[in-house]
Each structure stands twice: as C-alpha cells, then as structure tokens.
C-alpha cells in the first residue's frame, strides 16, 4: 500500500512530535466516519497511516522531511559501540536466564528512551531552545556539538532512538521468553 | 516468505563468535542500519600472507541480516584482502534471494567486510612494539 508522503496532512493533524496514541485513535475513529463512503481501501490507508505515526521514529522522520532535514546520516561509531554492548548484554542475559539482569537493564533503559523522546519534542515542537547533549554526543568535544545545526542534533537523536528502541524491544522479548519458560506455579 | 538459503543461514549461522580485537592481525567492522536498528559486527583474522584465515560475526537483527553476515564470513575465509574487498552486496542478495525490502541487509554485510579490512590495514600502519624494546 502506498501512503502519501505527508501523513500528518493526510490524517488532518497538525504536525507535531508530542502526539499521544489516544489522539491518533480519536482521529482514526473520526476518519472512519468521514471517509466511510470511499470504501475499504481508504480505510486501510487511514489505519496504516495511524499505525505508522504511532511509532515515534516514523513521526520524527515525517517532521524532519517537512523541514527538509536529512533523515539518514553516517552512523556515529560511539553510538554503534554502545548499542552493540547493550545488545550483547541482552543476548547473554537471555541465554543465561538472567531475568534480574534484564529487568535492571530495562529499568535503566526506559528513562534513557524517555529522555530521547523529550529532547526530540523540545527540538521538533518547541521554540528552538537549548538542547542538552545526548549520551553519545556528550562524549564529543563540546565545541563540535555547538557547531551542529538543529538538523544535525536532531539526526543524532533520531538515530539513537531507532537503535535504542530496537534494543528495548529485544530486552522486552527476552524478559517475556524467560517468563514463559518459568514452571507454572499454582496458588 | 524467506528463501531456503536465508533459512539455512538463519537456523545454522556459520562462524558466529568473536575474535580478539586487540590482536594486531584482527580487523573489526561494526555497522548498523539506522532504518531498522540492526547492528552487525564482523571480524577477520589475517595471516602473514594477507589471506583471511578466520572470519567471525555477531549480528543483532532480522533473519536476513544474520544470513547476510553468515554468508559473508563463509565467502571471505581463505580469500585475500583484495578479493574479499571486491565482494558486492548484490552477489550476497542474489545468493540469498533477498526480497527488495531486505536488500539493505546485504549492503550492511558488504560495509562490514569493508570496515573490517580498513581496520586491519589501519592497524598495520601503526608501528608495533619491537621485541626487546630497544628504541632509538
């Protein structure tokens, strides 16, 4: 299914990053009524567009495109190293059945992910404000970060969000798998 | 959905593992796919004669990415660095019969080979400590 390039205008929504899933659900229900006469193809497109925009990385990408900012860049080696370390830890913990280790990783990870989302909200929705360096950016020389444009900073955040979200997914899947493997207990 | 070759390399990936990154004869390539968040690490151990005697990989990603890196390690073992550097992503994609949406996995594998070779070559230009430790 080919979706239109601008999902916000397709759904009749103001382009913004801080968009709650409940807002998208509400708009989806409105569009079911508004576009009912157009048939099932139109409804499928609405569903697909809503599903896409619920993904923060896709939402950010859409907003980048509206601004003419690049959505792909050369990978940051420091970020890749860190993500690789995270993924390897999750993989090992899953194999060892270290559920406590996975839960501890997750406890530390969720604020990190929240922080990335907050920073992107600030950069994409707010007035161009001071932006805190991300973990990976913090290790760069500060003057180099200062020279980065908003687009450059935003791209670093987006890349980190993409990789990091996948690591969180992997950890969640590992926790679920270990949970399922536990012997049943009867109360 | 996936071809037989992909399934074979996904279910029985060859050469999964790690080589000692501190070994001067080992080159490491770490690459990622920002589109899907996959990360792939490919390492090579090069003999005195410039031949890749061992290749190992670890990939955190989809089946196609695992298959592409598994196949890549299989292909480069026993080849010279120059031969390995010539491996094209299209050949990997063709061998695995990757669908268009998974072509980027083969690109990732090609990049990983290239970076591992670059890393090895960079290490060779750094003077090694000489046994005996006599410096001028």
Image: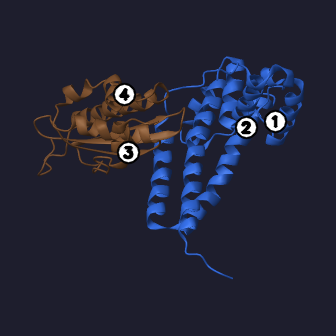
Chain colours: A blue, B brown
Q: Residue at x 79, y 37 (%)?
A: A18
Chain on which label 1 sits:
A
Residue A24 marker: 1
Check if mark 3 and mark 1 are on a common chain. Answer: no
Residue A75 at x, y = what percent?
A: 49, 32
For the residues labelled 2 and 1, say whether their Cβ atoms are less than 8 Å apart: yes
Separation of marks 4 and 1 at Cα, in angstroms: 38 Å
Closer to us: A149 or A85: A85
Check if mark 3 and mark 2 are on a common chain. Answer: no
Q: From the viewer's perspective, is the residue at label 3 or at label 2 nearer?
A: 3
Chain on which label 2 sits:
A
Crowd around label 2: few <14 · some 14–19 · many ≥20 (10 Å): some
Separation of marks 2 and 4 at Cα, in angstroms: 31 Å
Separation of marks 4 and 3 at Cα, in angstroms: 14 Å
Is residue B27 placed above or below B81 in the rendered structure? below
Q: How many marks?
A: 4
Report which residue position mark 3 lands on. Answer: B10
Element under disc 2 = helix
Separation of marks 3 and 2 at Cα, in angstroms: 30 Å
For the residues labelled 3 and 2, say whether their Cβ atoms are less than 8 Å apart: no
Element under disc 3 = helix
Residue A128 at x, y = what percent?
A: 77, 28
Could one spot residue B112 in this view of the protein? yes
Residue A114 at x, y = what percent?
A: 70, 47
Quarter holding the N terminus of chain A is top right
Check if mark 4 and mark 1 are on a common chain. Answer: no
Crowd around label 4: few <14 · some 14–19 · many ≥20 (10 Å): many
Report which residue position mark 2 lands on. Answer: A54
């Amino acid at each position: 299914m080919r979706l239109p390039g601008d999902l916000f205008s397709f759904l009749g929504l103001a382009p913004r990053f801080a968009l709650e899933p409940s807002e998208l659900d509400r708009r989806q229900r409105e569009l079911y009524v508004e576009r009912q006469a157009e048939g099932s193809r139109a409804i499928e497109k609405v569903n697909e567009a809503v599903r896409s925009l619920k993904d923060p990385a896709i939402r950010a990408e859409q907003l980048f495109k509206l601004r003419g900012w690049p959505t792909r860049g050369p990978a940051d080696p420091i970020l890749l190293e860190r993500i690789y370390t995270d993924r390897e830890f999750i993989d090992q913990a899953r194999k060892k059945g270290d559920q406590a280790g996975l839960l501890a990783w997750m406890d530390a990870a969720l604020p990190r992910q929240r922080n990335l989302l907050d920073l992107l909200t600030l950069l994409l929705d707010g007035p161009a404000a001071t932006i805190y360096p991300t973990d990976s950016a913090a290790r760069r020389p500060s003057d180099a970060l200062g020279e980065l444009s908003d687009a450059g900073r935003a791209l670093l955040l987006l890349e980190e969000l993409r990789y990091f979200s996948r690591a969180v997914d992997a950890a969640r899947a590992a926790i679920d798998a270990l949970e399922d493997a536990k012997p049943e207990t009867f109360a | 959905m996936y071809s037989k070759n992909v399934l074979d390399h996904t279910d029985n990936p060859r050469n999964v593992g790690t080589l000692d990154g501190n070994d001067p004869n080992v080159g490491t390539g770490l690459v990622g796919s920002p589109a899907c968040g996959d990360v792939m690490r490919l390492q090579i151990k090069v003999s005195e004669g410039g031949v890749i005697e061992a290749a190992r990989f670890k990939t955190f990603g989809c089946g196609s990415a695992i298959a592409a890196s598994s196949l890549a390690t299989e292909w480069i073992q026993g080849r010279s660095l120059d031969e390995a550097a010539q491996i094209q992503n299209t050949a990997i994609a063709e061998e695995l019969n990757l669908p268009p949406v998974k072509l980027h996995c083969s690109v990732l594998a090609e990049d990983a080979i290239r970076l591992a070779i670059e890393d090895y070559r960079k290490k060779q230009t750094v003077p090694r400590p000489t046994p005996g430790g006599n410096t001028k």
